[in-house]
Image (cartoon, rainbow, N blue to C red):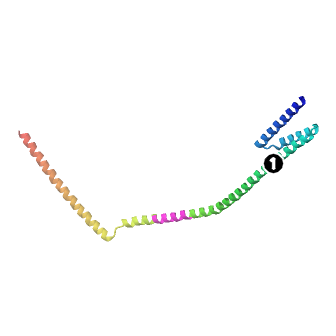
Amino acid sequence: MNSARSTEDVDNEDLFAGLALQRQWDDKPDLDQLYTTLMEVYCKLENNEDVSEQQERLYLLGTRVKAKTGSFMNSWRYKMKHMATNVRVLKMKKKTVAWNIPRIEQNYLAKCKFYQKKKSFNEVYDKLGRIVSRLPNVKQLDSTASELLNRRIKIMTKIDKLKEQIEAQKSQIDSIYLLLSKE
């Protein structure tokens, strides 16, 4: 009975070790640890009398390793395929950008030069227009002279009227002063 319990304990320990190995393999596959576990099982196979049971465990461990390795390789194959398509897409984008950037720069520079020329021509025409508009012609000179003469006459009449008003007010102030001084 004691020997039965000890074999059950060994079976449980192997089961726990297998579950721990499964968890570690699911988390992160470590081939060195897997190799050491396989070697431990192989050593137990040589030391134990129940060879068929150990062979079954070794076979199950081997099939599990084979399945995990296959799934691992498949996932990496899909990742590599995806990375290859991404590389192709990025290469095409880089090629189109490299092809388009010089043309965009040339187009932008051409537009800047065009607007600069247009602006400079407009500035020159504006300056010439201002200068020409300041230069009077003969008709403008005659009309300007007559306007200035009319303005001068109006201003002189206003000045004469103001002088008369000032003199009238001065005479009124003088008369008021005389009246107040007599009393």
Q: Is residue 117 magenta?
A: yes
Disc 1 target residue: 67
Q: Which residues are magenta?
A: 110-122
Task: State the residue at coordinates (28%, 68%).
Answer: 143
Residue at the outermost left position: 183
Along the viewing direction, whichever of 173 and 84 lies nearer the viewer: 84
Q: Quadrant of residue 97?
A: bottom right
Along the viewing direction, whichever of 39 and 53 lies nearer the viewer: 53
- Using the image, determine if residue 155 lies above or below residue 36: below
Q: Is residue 149 left or right of residue 10?
A: left
Task: State the residue at coordinates (29%, 66%).
Answer: 144
What is the magenta segment's predominant secondary structure? helix
Task: State the residue at coordinates (80%, 39%).
Answer: 19
Q: Is residue 104 magenta?
A: no
Amino acid at the residue labelled 1: Ala
Q: Residue 146 in the image: x percent, y percent?
A: 25, 66
Q: Quadrant of the C terminus?
A: top left
Along the viewing direction, whichever of 108 and 158 lies nearer the viewer: 108
Residue at the outermost top position: 2
Circle 1 — which element?
A: helix
Q: Is residue 9 left or right of residue 159?
A: right
Q: Residue 114 in the image: x percent, y percent?
A: 52, 65
Q: Quadrant of the N terminus?
A: top right
Q: Residue 56 in the image: x percent, y percent?
A: 88, 43
Q: Is residue 70 left or right of residue 44?
A: left
Q: Looking at the image, how many numbered discs can be counted on the residues? A: 1
Q: Residue 53 in the image: x percent, y percent?
A: 89, 40
Residue at the outermost bottom position: 138
Crowding at mark 1 (Cα within 10 Å: few <14, some 14-19, many 20+): few
